[in-house]
Image: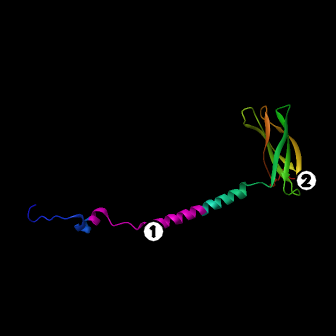
Amino acid sequence: MQSGETVTTEGDADPAPLAERYGTPRRPRSSRRGRGWLFGGIAVVVSCAIAWIAYVNLGQTSIDAERVAFEERPGNAMQITINVTRDDPDRPGVCIVRVRDRAGAESGRKEVLVPAGAGHSRVSTVVKSIGRPVTADVYGCSYSIPRYLSTP
């Protein structure tokens, strides 16, 4: 070692040049951890709200139907018979039935008015198809009856 040179060890290093080179220290981890808990809590609350809305809108319906029978008719048509079950027999409802072609594509659809009456109703209708139908099923039911189906 020559005269005038100084040897420094890690413990003796001047902190000012390190701060200039690497910047000032970051915040402590505890504030980041707290922010993570906050965002996690918000995510849980939003997820629960979405699940509740989906349950209310997509949960069990108060009116439901199942296909009992279907039979091919001449002229690219099919007769379908459905059983409708509802929680409020005093309200009329509407069910959408459809027929499918050989490829499985929907080839015909019809809305069927289910008049007020018993809690369990059996309804039969004929659905016309654009091609030869091979099966029929129920798309869904609702109490929201279109104006053109309601009786005056």
Q: For mark 1, give the secondary structure.
A: helix
Gap in angstroms between the C-alphas marked 1 and 2: 63 Å
- Say if 112 sits above or below 91 in the image: above
- Say if 145 sits above or below 22 in the image: above
Of mark 1 and mark 2, the one earlier in the sequence is 1
Residue 43 shown in magenta: yes
**Residue under the point 68% across and 60% down:** 52
Q: Main secondary structure of the magenta part?
A: helix
In the image, residue 109 lies at what x, y percent? 79, 41
Which segment did they paint magenta? 18-44
Q: For mark 2, give the secondary structure.
A: loop
Tag 1 residue:
31
Q: Where does the C terminus fall, quadrant-wise?
A: bottom right
User: In the image shown, does 37 or 117 lie closer to the viewer?
Assistant: 37
In the displayed structure image, the side of residue 101 where residue 112 appears, left or right: right
Colouring scheme, one of rainbow, by chain, secondary structure, one colour: rainbow
**Residue under the point 83% across and 50% down:** 94
User: In the image shown, does 69 or 111 lie closer to the viewer?
Assistant: 69
Amino acid type for the residue under numbered disc 2: Ala
Tag 2 residue:
118
**Residue under the point 29% across and 66% down:** 19
Q: Quadrant of residue 71?
A: top right
In the image, residue 79 lies at what x, y percent? 86, 38
Residue extending furthest toward the left:
3
User: In the image shown, does 97 or 42 lie closer to the viewer?
Assistant: 42
Amino acid type for the residue under numbered disc 1: Ser
